Amino acid sequence: MNYEEAKRSLASHANLPGTDLPIEGSFVGGLWLLTQKNVEPRFMQHADEIIYCLRTVNTHFNGPDPNSRSGCPDHSRISEVAYFVSRIISGGLTLHLKLNRMRQLDPDSLTQLSGELCRIAYAWDQFLAGDVSDILEGFDITLD
C-alpha cells in the first residue's frame, strides 16, 4: 500500500463524503449501521486495515525506519490525514457510547470495540511521536 492509497482508505474508514468505499467497508460507517439494524460487526477487520494504513503513513512522514531518524519529525503536511484519523477515533467513541446505551452489542463485543479504538489511538500517538518504527510496540503493556 502506498501513501495515497492509505490516505484514501483512512478517509473511507472515517465515513467521509466522496470516498469510494461502501458504508459496510468503513469503520465508522459499519458502527453506524450497527446502531440502525442488526448487522454483523466487522470492526476488528476494519481496525486492522486502519493500523495497516497508519503504518504506511508513519513511514511516509517519519522515514523507512523512524527509530533511526534523527531530528524532529516533519509533520507540516499531517493535516492530509489528521482529520480522517480524528474522525475515526471520535466517531468510533461516539458510536461505541451509543451502542452501549442501546445495548446493541453484547458486553464482550463492546470490550473488543473499546480495545480496537484504544489500539487505533495508540498507533496514532506513536506516529505523532515521530521516532517509533513499530507503532503498536508496547501497546499490550498499556493494557496490563
Image (cartoon, rainbow, N blue to C red):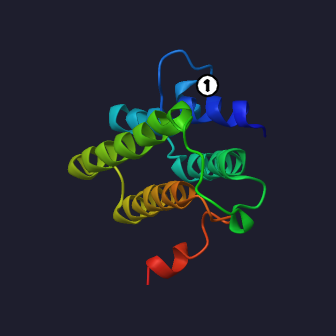
Look at the image and tell me in which quarter the N terminus lies: top right
Q: Is residue 143 above or below residue 35?
A: below
Residue for point 57% across, 34% down: 77
Residue 47 picture location, percent across and down? 56, 50
Give 117 or 58, whichever is nearer the viewer: 58
Provide the residue designation for mark 1: 21
Q: Is residue 135 above or below residue 142?
A: above
Residue for point 58% across, 56% down: 72
Tell which residue pokes out farthest to the front in this image: 71
Give 103 or 93, whichever is nearer the viewer: 93
Residue for point 44% across, 55% down: 117
Q: Amino acid at mark 1?
A: Leu
Query: Few, some or many C-alpha atoms within 10 Å of disc 1 (few <14, some 14-19, many ≥20)?
Result: some
Q: In the picture, residue 143 is in which quadrant?
A: bottom left
Q: Is residue 81 above or below residue 17?
A: below
Total numbered circles: 1
Look at the image and tell me in which quarter the C terminus lies: bottom left
Residue 67 picture location, percent across and down? 70, 68
Q: In the picture, residue 106 is in which quadrant?
A: bottom left
Residue 82 picture location, percent across and down? 48, 38
SS of the residue under disc 1: loop
